[in-house]
Amino acid sequence: MRIDLCCIGSRFNMYRNAIALLYHALVDAGHDVTVSQNQIGNAALTIIVPPMAFRVPALVEELRRRQQPYAVLGIETFDGFSHAQSPDASDELDSFRAFFESASAVLCLFKQDVERYRTVTPRPLWLRYGVHPALEEIANLPNRPVDVFFFGDVEPYPERRRILQELRSAGLVIDVLEGSSQAPHELIRNARIARAKINLNLAHADHVSPQRVVYLANNRLCCVSNTVPDSDGYLAAAYPVLDTDNLVDACRAIAADGSWRRLGAEAHERVRSWTMVETVSAAVDRALAL
């Protein structure tokens, strides 16, 4: 089947891990897959990334005109919508409902979103983020001069700033690549990930980003994370620390004793059964049957 993965907007690099994961999984499942940006093709099924695409009126109109099946990848949580708490007060509600009511399915990466989406569509499905050999792409360097690497927005989040400063004050070598919203090419990011003993996940909301933690485990890399609600089980891909005050001590110990290699290998073992080919194939079949 011809499937197009279509990213709407200017943040392709931000969603690149998920798009690449779906691409390779769907190809291995035997589908004819294309990847596009800001342009709807002539596929049997279009999977649109991200769900905020509903804010592009021309896209909504084009989908309505074509009457072609499309699914939406719920890569951002439902609570991230401005009208999630008070939808009746939102001037976006009509386009929001039209976009999701017409979708063949909403493929939710977070279980917590399934019931939330039922308010606008009867077709939400949980799609657990998984692993694929093609995403094992980060160099396994024998020598890593950086103790801790963090990629993400820092300035808007005081807790992130505090933790990173405490890590520096503890004498650790810290590398920070800011600006996940306008993310660089993955090679720029991955070259810096590869130089670090520990990769840091600092969740700023009540969910865990599988694009980071599962991707790192896919690459046998040690990811130290703060602990947040995780109904999806994604923290199995990381080394979670219950108290952020203990996070600095954990990073210092892991960097010093060399256990980061073992912890990365153990994380990979915990997620290796999350094979994305079977998961996404089942989701596509269910989406088209709904």
Image: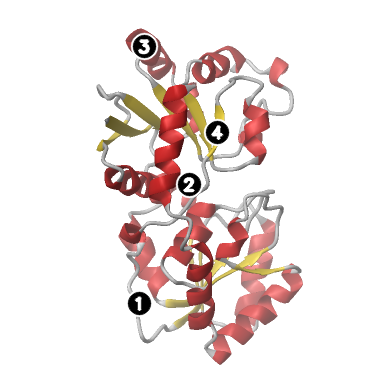
Near mark 3 (Cα within 10 A), the count class, few <14, some 14-19 or many ≥20, is few
Image point (40%, 10%), residue name: 64
Q: Is residue 200 left or right of residue 194?
A: right
Location of residue 201 in the rendering, given as x and y in whole percent from the top left corner? 58, 63
Of tags 4 and 3, which is closer to the observer?
A: 4
- Residue 23 drawn above or below residue 287: below
Q: Amino acid at mark 4?
A: Leu
Are circles 4 and 3 on residues that touch, CB within 8 Å?
no
Of tags 1 and 3, which is closer to the observer?
A: 3
**Distance between the alpha carbons at the discs numbered 4 and 2:** 26 Å
Image point (43%, 64%), residue name: 218
Location of residue 142 in the rendering, given as x and y in whole percent from the top left corner? 36, 86
Which residue is identified by label 2?
A: 181
Which residue is identified by label 1?
A: 140
- Residue 94 drawn above or below residue 50: above
Of helix, strand and loop, which one carries label 1?
A: loop
Q: Which picture quadrant has residue 219?
A: bottom left
Residue 125's disc number: 4
**Distance between the alpha carbons at the discs numbered 4 and 1:** 35 Å
Q: Amino acid at mark 1?
A: Asn
Q: Amino acid at mark 2?
A: Ser
Q: Amino acid at mark 3?
A: Gln
Quadrant (top left/top right/bottom left/bottom right) for the N terminus: top left
Which residue is identified by label 3?
A: 67
Mark 2 or mark 1: name the one nearer the start of the chain: 1
Mark 1 or mark 3: name the one nearer the start of the chain: 3
Q: Is residue 85 visible?
A: yes
Of helix, strand and loop, which one carries label 3?
A: loop
Q: Is residue 114 left or right of residue 274?
A: right
